[in-house]
Image (cartoon, rainbow, N blue to C red):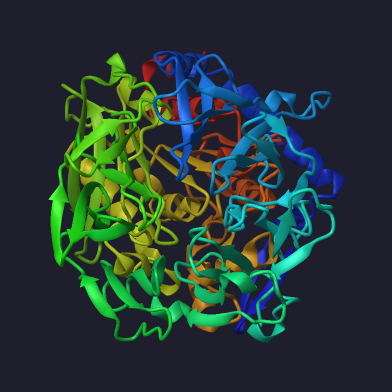
């Protein structure tokens, strides 16, 4: 048994040996756990029904479209997946009303390989004449990138390796001669140094991609004192902007930002100059001539939009254009030729679109009331605004806004389906009193006519980290739970951004306990109001949401019949030692500081598993390719739970050797299987009569 001493406190770690993934006994144990888990899940009678049901939902639409990207010349690029296809293909339209053209089928990439590749990112150049296409092996984040000539529909020579477009994307140079990307020196996700010493490098079309030309990195900017875990990212917001930007990124809400004149981007003679610091709490910037418009939470938890000069920037006392409001949080803004458009969201679930021009703001009525609104523009030179609406039970829709008529034109890229199974679903938005009197928003989804007699299986879901808002999202996977008679309850717990930056900081490092206590309060509310009962309650947490779900389970095991943890971070005391761990210090803390160590111990689910306690049935999933939460993290939790749990409930560990973090970059079938495994397990343990193995 390993014993660690932190600030004079002894902490025992009985399953430290599992961290050695090269140990044959650990490898054998993982394989045995995986075999048992999938064998058990396959005995649940309606597991396959849930997979087939998701396929049926998928086939209600002829196809699905994602990654919609438009360029200044009116071209559209997108990933389109036909109903019976498992992987999407890249398509193009010269304009929105033109016939689409197939640009690339990922099945053609390395055709002789047994590996499946998915398109995980696309970025056309400024003119829409070329497009960079990123492909990764199923379940992986690290990508190969190549460029397609749109006119000739041909792949240009040269493939960029070791790229991670999930972080920072790809930035085309203003003259379209190449692009900048984040390069990872190591690609083995099991290596503790994976993700360290990344660098922004430029690839010039036709050059040798293995000869790396650094643009922003620890080595070529030593005076900036970048840490190995920092992600040095370059941003080129518009091809006509006079300046380019560089950001020191990682797992934190706000960044340090630097800038250069555009013409100096690829020269080492000029250094990057500091524009603003993390303490300025800037979320987004837009350059308008020599002014910067920016979104900031400084002295404004619900955010404001302000302006300062690029020549003489002042982030302490800028001109406030759109002040903070009690009506909601400003989540995004875009600048067009016709003024500023921005989105304000109340409680993370009620979004509204506004137009700000000549010092006044006016609400723009969108075609359908929406819980979440996404906006994008081509910049302040153009009268163009794309608007996407999102909801819990209605399919996502994208529009172009007509400035003259104040109307919206559907893009019709993605066919709208009415999904007959979702027609009788009801959404309730409530607020629940938490342990300290704070009101926590919660979204409740169920079928019309459900009886509030405590008999409904209820799945609680939440996240609560990084200031990320769990705004309304349309998921046929999650809605399968509701169509089968269950209730879905999404708790907007502290640590997220639903109520602004104050809400984030109220579930951050030493205040992290509010995250799981909010979830416990929401669970108790649902039981008290007779939506459900403890015997019918299940909880789901993914990634950092594993802290929320796991600690709710360990603090109140009596409240839940089932727990589902997907790629969960549950051994936070050891977070710094694992892949991607150093970056998470910014959100959760470090063991090197006494107060933060105590907070990490408090949020460590693994260390809160106690002997002779009756814990709920638990399903844990993990991907061997995961570069964010290494597989040994949940593995240690599983081993301890199996040894200490005094209840006769299953603890299953479904290890997927083809998947990465939380199903990222997976095929459709893999996604269907993940939902089916989790939901059938939860129905089984909450007593649904049709999900009981013989």
In the figure, is residue 209 to the left or right of 225? right
What residue appears at the point 38 percent right and 24 percent down from the top-left corner? 480
Q: Nearer the viewer, residue 628 or 562?
A: 628
In the figure, is residue 474 to the left or right of 173? left
Can you give x and y, in whole percent of width and height, for residue 498 in the image? 30, 57
Q: Quadrant of the N terminus?
A: bottom right
In the figure, is residue 666 to the left or right of 547? right
Q: Nearer the viewer, residue 624 or 308?
A: 308
Q: Nearer the viewer, residue 389 or 575?
A: 389
Residue 305 in view here: yes
Can you give x and y, in whole percent of width and height, for residue 619 in the image? 54, 37
Can you give x and y, in whole percent of width and height, for residue 220 in the image? 74, 76
Q: Which quadrant of the structure image shows residue 422?
A: top left
What residue appears at the point 70 percent right and 51 percent down from the top-left corner? 163
Q: Is residue 643 above or below residue 648?
A: below
Q: Which quadrant of the structure image shows residue 13?
A: bottom right
Q: Which quadrant of the structure image shows residue 449?
A: top left
Residue 511 in view here: no
Can you give x and y, in whole percent of width and height, for residue 5 in the image? 66, 78
Q: Is residue 300 above or below residue 422?
A: below
In the figure, is residue 628 to the left or right of 433? right
User: How many numbered callouts?
Assistant: 0
Q: Is residue 511 above or below residue 473?
A: below
What residue appears at the point 19 percent right and 34 percent down from the top-left corner? 367
């Amino acid at each position: 048994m390993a014993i660690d001493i932190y600030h004079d406190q002894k902490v025992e770690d009985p399953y430290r040996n599992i961290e050695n993934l090269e140990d044959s006994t650990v490898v054998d144990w993982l394989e045995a756990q995986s075999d048992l888990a999938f064998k058990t899940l396959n005995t649940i009678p309606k597991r396959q029904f849930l997979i087939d049901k998701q396929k049926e939902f998928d086939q209600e639409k002829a196809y699905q479209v994602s990654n919609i990207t438009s360029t200044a010349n009116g071209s559209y690029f997108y990933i389109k997946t036909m109903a019976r296809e498992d992987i999407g293909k890249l398509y193009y339209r010269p304009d929105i009303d033109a016939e689409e053209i197939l640009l690339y089928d990922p099945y053609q990439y390395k055709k002789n390989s047994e590996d499946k590749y998915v398109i995980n990112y696309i970025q056309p150049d400024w003119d829409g004449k070329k497009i960079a296409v990123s492909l990764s092996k199923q379940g992986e984040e690290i990508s190969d990138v190549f460029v397609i000539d749109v006119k000739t529909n041909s792949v240009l020579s040269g493939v960029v390796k070791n790229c991670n477009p999930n972080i920072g994307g790809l930035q085309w140079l203003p003259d379209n001669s190449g692009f900048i990307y984040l390069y990872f020196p190591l690609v083995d996700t099991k290596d503790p140094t994976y993700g360290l010493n990344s660098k922004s490098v430029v690839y010039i079309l036709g050059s040798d991609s293995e000869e790396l030309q650094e643009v922003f990195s620890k080595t070529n900017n030593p005076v900036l004192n970048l840490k190995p875990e920092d992600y040095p990212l370059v941003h080129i917001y518009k091809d006509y902007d006079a300046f380019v930007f560089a950001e020191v990124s990682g797992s934190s809400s706000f960044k340090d930002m630097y800038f250069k004149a555009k013409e100096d981007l690829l020269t080492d003679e000029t250094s990057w100059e500091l524009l603003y610091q993390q303490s300025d709490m800037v979320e987004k910037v837009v350059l308008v001539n020599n002014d910067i418009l920016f979104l900031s939470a400084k002295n404004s938890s619900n955010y404001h939009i302000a302006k300062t000069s690029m020549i003489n920037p002042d982030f302490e006392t800028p001109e406030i254009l759109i002040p903070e409001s009690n009506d909601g949080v400003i989540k995004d803004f875009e600048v067009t030729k016709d003024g500023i458009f921005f989105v304000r969201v109340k409680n993370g679930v009620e979004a509204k679109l506004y137009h700000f021009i000549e010092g006044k703001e006016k609400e723009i009525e969108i075609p359908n009331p929406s819980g979440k609104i996404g906006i994008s523009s081509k910049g302040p030179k153009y009268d163009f605004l794309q608007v996407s609406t999102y909801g819990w039970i209605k399919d996502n829709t994208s529009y172009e806004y007509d400035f003259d008529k104040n109307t919206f034109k559907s893009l019709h890229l993605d066919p709208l389906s009415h999904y007959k199974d979702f027609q009788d679903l009801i959404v309730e938005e409530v607020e629940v009193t938490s342990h300290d009197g704070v009101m926590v928003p919660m979204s409740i989804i169920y079928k019309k006519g459900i009886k509030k007699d405590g008999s409904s299986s209820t799945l609680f879901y939440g996240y609560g980290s990084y200031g990320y808002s769990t705004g309304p999202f349309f998921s046929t996977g999650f809605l399968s739970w509701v169509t089968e008679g269950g209730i879905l309850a999404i708790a907007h717990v502290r640590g997220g951004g639903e109520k602004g930056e104050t809400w984030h900081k109220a579930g951050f490092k030493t205040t992290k306990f509010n995250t799981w206590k909010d979830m416990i309060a929401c669970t108790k509310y649902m039981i008290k109001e007779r939506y459900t009962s403890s015997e019918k309650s299940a909880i789901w947490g993914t990634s950092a949401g594993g802290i929320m779900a796991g600690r709710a389970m360990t603090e109140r095991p009596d409240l839940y019949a089932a727990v589902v943890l997907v790629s969960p971070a549950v051994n936070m005391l050891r977070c710094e030692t694992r892949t991607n761990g150093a970056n998470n210090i910014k959100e959760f803390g470090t063991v090197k500081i006494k107060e933060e160590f105590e907070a990490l111990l408090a949020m460590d689910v693994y260390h809160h598993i106690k002997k002779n306690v009756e814990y709920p049935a638990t399903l844990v999933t993990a991907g061997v390719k995961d570069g964010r939460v290494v597989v040994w993290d949940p593995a240690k939790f599983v081993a301890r739970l199996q040894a200490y749990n005094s209840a006769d409930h299953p603890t299953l560990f479904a290890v997927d050797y083809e998947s990465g973090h939380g199903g990222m970059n997976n095929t459709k079938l893999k996604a269907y299987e993940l939902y089916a495994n989790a939901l059938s397990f939860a129905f089984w343990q909450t007593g649904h009569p049709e999900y009981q193995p013989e």
